[in-house]
Amino acid sequence: MSDIKRISSFVNSYIKDDEGLLGEIYYKAVSDGVPVIRKEARELLKTQLLIKKPKNILEIGTAVGYSSLFMSQFISNESRITTIELDEQRVIEAGNNIKLLGKEEVIKVIKGDALEIISGLPDASYDFLFVDAAKGQYINYYENLVRIAEPGAIIVSDNILQDGEILESHYTVEKRNRTIHDRMREYLYKITHDERVESAILSVADGMAVTIKK
């Protein structure tokens, strides 16, 4: 086992498992091969929510609704989560899971292409954004993310290290993955050089970026 895997295993040993229905949703998703937020990543997400105390949260990449349901535990009764998912079957499953936990008033699922949807959202309409969707699209989302984020908003981007592949040069990455690789590199450069924001790139789970709009 590599040192990185040993560290991850050690950290995970301190993380409490979800209880009840939420835990069942998580482990079913993992068993079915559905991409859900990793345990270390969700702990960082939790702390950001508790610090920020956001009112309006936007998530890009619903999957089966797990991360929205997880986030809903750490927000106020007045806070609301809007989450976007393209896959129709996952929208249905997410909706069922949200109903199962009685969170219909808190979480709204929108089916559609995220870029199209966020392009139509009002300026400065969210104070917390969580991006966990197609990695090759992050750079395409970026300008709209900054636009719809209010000053002081936090943007959390997940899976930015692509299981370590982001470290490789363009020509050593498998040809089919080069576009995603290059776009993620572009995204990371953008969030760390754009004067409108401040960002930290963290090697948590498969990499997370925490970006704050000035």
Image: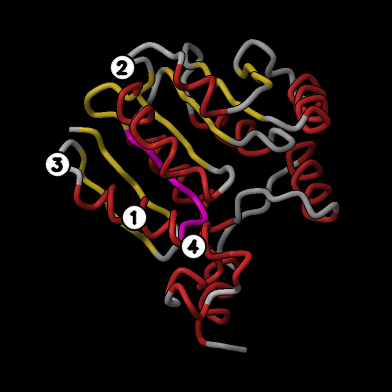
Single out the residue that lies furthest toward the left.
195
Q: Position of residue 158 (x, y in %)?
A: 49, 50
Q: Label 1 near label 3: C-beta < 8 Å? A: no
Disc 4 marks which residue?
Answer: 181
According to the image, label 1 marks what residue?
A: 188
Q: CA distance from mark 3 to mark 2?
A: 17 Å
Q: Residues within 10 Å of mark 3 (few under 14, many from 20)?
A: few
Q: Is residue 143 shown left or right of residue 4? A: left
Q: Quick one: SS at disc 1?
A: helix
Q: Of the residues shown, which amino acid type is indicated by label 2?
A: Ala
Q: Which residue is mark 3?
A: 195
Q: Quadrant of residue 83?
A: top right
Kindly indicate whether the residue at mark 3 contacts the one at mark 4 (C-beta within 8 angstroms).
Answer: no
Q: CA distance from mark 1 to mark 2?
A: 22 Å
The answer to whether 31 is drawn above or below residue 126 in the figure is below
Q: Nearer the viewer, residue 16 or 140?
A: 140
Locate residue 145, reporting x and y percent: 37, 30
Mark 2: secondary structure: loop
Q: Which residue is mark 2?
A: 124
User: Magenta segment range?
Assistant: 154-160
For residue 205, say whether it is visible: no
Question: In 3D space, how far apart are the residues under numbered discs 2 and 4 (Cα atoms)?
Answer: 29 Å
Q: Residue at x 33, y 58 (%)?
A: 201
* Location of the C terminus (image quadrant): top left
Image position of 38 with respect to 56: above or below = below
Q: Residue at x 35, y 21 (%)?
A: 148
The first of marks 2 and 4 along the sequence is: 2
- Residue 153: in sight, yes or no? yes
* Number of other residues with Cα within 10 Å of mark 2, as a class: few under 14, some 14 to 19, many 20 or more: some
Most common SS among magenta residues: strand
